Image (tube, rainbow, N blue to C red):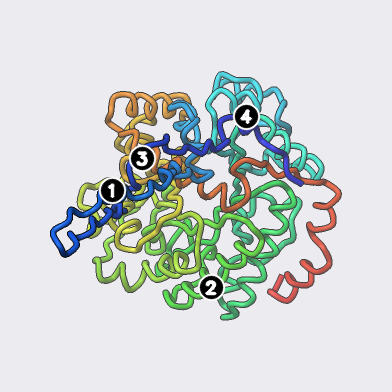
Amino acid sequence: MLRRIGTTGLLVIALTACGGGGASPGTAGTAGTAGSAPTGGKAAPPAQTPTQTPAQTTAAPQQSPVQRVLAKMSVEEKVGQLFMPVLYGTAADTVSGENQARYAARTPAKVIAKYHLGGVILFPQNVKSIGQVVGLTNGLQRASDEVPLLIGTDQENGLVSRMSALMTDFPGASQIGASRDTGLSREVAKATGDELRALGVNLDFAPVADVNVNPRNPVIGRRAFGDDPQRVAKMVAAAVKGFGEAKIAATAKHFPGHGDTSVDSHTGLPVIKHTKSEWERIDAPPFKAAIGAGVDAVMSAHIVFPKLDSSGDPATLSKPILTGLLREQLGFKGVISTDALNMAGVRKKYNDGEIAVRAVLAGADLLLMPNDLPRAYEAVLAAVKSGRISEQRLDQSVTRLLTLKQNKGLLTEAPVASAEEAAGVLRSAEHRRLAARAGN
């Protein structure tokens, strides 16, 4: 079921050229040819005036649906589209002191309206029961006036499973990777996506595309499909296709590759010393495969990669990495999401407002979980108004986010989840059999 969102300003008015106008650009008028003088010296009769054809009408170029939505947005609304924070409560109208303290708004619905949010991420604190989550996601969508929300979560399965209280217990990536069965990776991703979509979630921050080549890695480990770049690449591509079949946006993470670290970026700033050629051989293949499979988003890593960018900034704030490598070298045209901006790895050098601005300048489109949303929002808005972030650059990010929403049927119609339908999908007999076949 879909809920129609307001479409004021979305009607296309066909413009036609007024009568008497010139020919359309690129077409030349055909001139009449005068008759030659006849023999015998008599004057030739006057040349006939060529019949005038009606002036061609020139229709104004039609805007795409994304362009029409973008055109009616204020700068404040555009900036809001970039942000995806955590909201507190189990319903859209839950009054929470945490929301009040963090966002100066008492309920999730009021936070969405205040900051014109483009998305929200769900955590276990938001999850109690199927009916409750369905009510929450429907309520969050109703709170977004014009453009439906991206509602995301981290459902990697295995170690990181935010919705595990309700969903089928599928094995994590390392177990699926060990099977060497790409079909299994695809099936599990599709089933995971089907369950998420039934709850009203439309974006999953999965699959992990890191190649776990460091046995001491404290943050990736079993979350990765393995330590072989080519096998990981195949598993990632299969998972992306499975999520796509479920109509869920997939996110490959953590670019340019978090596999060879011994520091957890939640608590510190890892440094990866791979050369550019090592990166191309070890870290890049799964991301290339994800892009080739049509991945919707790629998440950045809060890691320093000196051979890719000598500035000392983490990849999340690095234009050479996000724009130079991901956009230009790998050709990725989708949404670039930051990893959570409340993590220590990205907060070593800059304040919370400057972090958000630098992430946008580096090439990020979606600013995930800013530590201080009011400060980050106001900093990005001020940067746009001052010209530090050009309006063109802002429009690029908003266009990518709106395009993702359009691709998932979320541009002008919000999905309305059904608790009854969700109860038939989550932990279904079919999905439990799949989990058992996968090893759980």
Q: Position of residue 289 (x, y in %)?
A: 45, 70
State which quadrant residue 193 falls in. bottom right
Give the Cα separation between the discs numbered 3 and 2: 30 Å
Q: Reading the chain from its start, which is encountered first: label 3 or label 1?
A: 1
Q: Where residue 145 is drawn, which disc sits there?
A: 4
Helix, strand or loop at disc 1?
helix
Within-10-Å neighbours for mark 2: few <14, some 14–19, many 20+: many
Helix, strand or loop at disc 2?
helix
Residue toward you, 211 or 130:
130
Q: Position of residue 132 (x, y in %)?
A: 79, 39
Q: Can you identify the residue that label 2 sits on?
A: 235
Q: Position of residue 64 (x, y in %)?
A: 50, 46
Q: Is residue 215 visible?
A: no
Q: Are marks 2 and 4 in contact (CB under 8 Å)?
A: no
Residue at 51%, 68% (x, y): give it.
236
Q: Amino acid at mark 2?
A: Met
Q: Amino acid at mark 4?
A: Asp
State which quadrant residue 181 falls in. bottom right
Q: Can you identify the residue that label 1 sits on?
A: 319
Q: Reading the chain from its start, which is encountered first: label 1 or label 4?
A: 4
Q: Can you identify the residue that label 3 sits on?
A: 360
Give the Cα separation between the discs numbered 1 and 2: 28 Å
Mark 1 or 4, closer to the camera: 4
Q: Reading the chain from its start, which is encountered first: label 3 or label 2?
A: 2
Q: Reading the chain from its start, which is encountered first: label 3 or label 4?
A: 4
Q: Amino acid at mark 1?
A: Lys
Q: Is residue 6 visible?
A: yes
Residue at 50%, 75% (x, y): give it.
234
Within-10-Å neighbours for mark 3: few <14, some 14–19, many 20+: many
Give the Cα separation between the discs numbered 3 and 1: 9 Å
